[in-house]
Amino acid sequence: MSLLIKNGVIVTASDKYMGDIFIENEIIKEIGLNITRVADEIIDAKGKYVIPGGIDIHTHFNLHVGNAVANDDFYTGTIAAACGGTTTIVDHMGFGPEGCNLKHQVDVYHEYADNNAVVDYGFHGVIQHVDDEILNEMKEIIDDCGIQSFKGYLTYDYKIDDDKMIRVFERLKELGGITTIHCENHGSIQYLRKKFVDKGFTSPKYHCLSRPVEAEGEAVNRMIKLAKIANYEGLYVVHLSTKDGLEHIKKARESGQNVYAETCPQYLLLDESKYELENNEGLKYIMSPPLRSAENCEALWQGISDGYIQTIATDHCPFSFNRDKQLGKSDFTKCPNGAPGVEERMALIFSEGVMKERISINKFVEVCCTNPAKIFGLYPKKGTIAVGSDADIAIIDPNKEVTFTTDKLHSNVDYTAYEGFRLKGYPIFTILRGKIISKDGEFVGEKGYGKYLKRNRI
Ligand code: URP
Ligand code: ZN
Ligand code: ZN
């Protein structure tokens, strides 16, 4: 099977040039001007951007929390990814039974994903508790399962204490692994949640008020300091939402300490005024960390452009508004946390970022495709356009205008957080290992075509 993409503007994290791409047997075989090879299929990409397929390094498919289950499984969720220009996702596995080992959830997630996913996929390990057994097991999870990253939470039921976190840092330093951390100060959040609920302040805006910017800033700073104590360079802050947290990351990086940071479209494009919407619509935006002020959004855009934030992922975690989110209608603490976004991400960042000149098109590719691959052990197989790389490509028509409405999107959920967003520029083809899996925003791929990706240590 071969495919020739002609006359496009090829964009990588560092280059932008006119050219043709010849693909055969899932791999990019040749890049050049006026390639005349015979191909099974030809796409004329004149006037379009040809970029690496998007990599969403933070999703939650099949996630079970309390009484609710995230509405996308690995089939529906990856269809949404494909239709939005994303060819690889790496999912954060949910918690397993108390006391389970790391492999337990890896097996559960292979059951969920194998033969279902339509884009390529990997998993991040999840740390529920820390002891010698878990630290030993990390080696085999990295070597045998190809999982070189593990997430620890500083809040929620399985929060990891500081002494344990240092042990994880020391171990993953030895093993060459990444520690991704959900950074929020647990004590202050617990205190504020109880205080508000006791006073009868239970509407969605109190979700936001109970998780102040300082709760994130403190936790980010604490993890930076603990990583420094462990002399560990693989700390990765997930879903950064605040200027406060960003300032700590900036300071660390400027002092020569390596810290990675990820943010998400919701923290760039939506603000805390959403919690005041009528008819309890604020429930749609209950996620942790919460949406912040517009000032924080602007600081994060600047952080991307200045290189302090390396990736934009989605934290896609869809709960239905009409059923699941209503659990929180008379008490925000009962509302399942999270929002959809896997399909919207690439178009949002292209339109709001590149077209509005907040970031360059190379930066867009860097943060949405290349850096996730580099940090999480997929590069150069994924994340770039180069001879020998997997032929994972999104073709963006910069003139295509789309207005987001729930009915046009593919996630198995009854709302989009970006309803009514008017976009300029949209992915019109998504190609995974040489096969067209989405065309004009519609899915044309095949259930189970997505392959599990073993990822390399850094
Ligand atoms: O509210 C969120 N972000 N839900 C998903 C779980 C997490 O913390 O990433
Ligand atoms: Zn998190
Ligand atoms: Zn998450």
Image (cartoon, grey):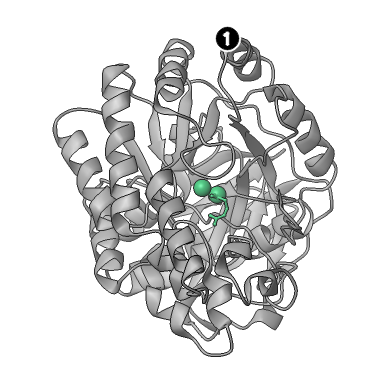
Quadrant of image for the C terminus:
top left
Q: Is residue 378 visible?
A: no
Q: Which residue is mark 1?
A: 132
Q: Position of residue 270 (x, y in %)?
A: 41, 73
Q: Is residue 178 left or right of residue 53?
A: left
In the rendering, at what x and y percent does residue 89 appear?
A: 61, 46
Looking at this view, is 71 or 41 the one in front? Answer: 71
Looking at the rendered structure, the number of numbered marks drawn on it comes to: 1
Viewer-proximal residue, 196 or 144?
A: 196
On the rendered structure, is 247 left or right of 393?
left
As drawn, 171 above or below 391: above
Q: Residue visible at 63% across and 64% down? A: 334
* Amino acid at pointer 1: Asp
Q: Nearer the viewer, residue 63 or 117?
A: 63
Q: Is residue 214 above or below residue 46?
A: above
At x 59%, y 40%, the residue is 28
Observer-nearest of 164 and 202? 202
- Picture coordinates of residue 340 (x, y %)? 61, 65
Quarter of the image for the N terminus: give it: top right
In the rendered image, the vertical position of residue 274 relative to residue 347, given as above or below: below
Quarter-wise, where is residue 452 in the image? top right
Residue 6 shows in the view: yes
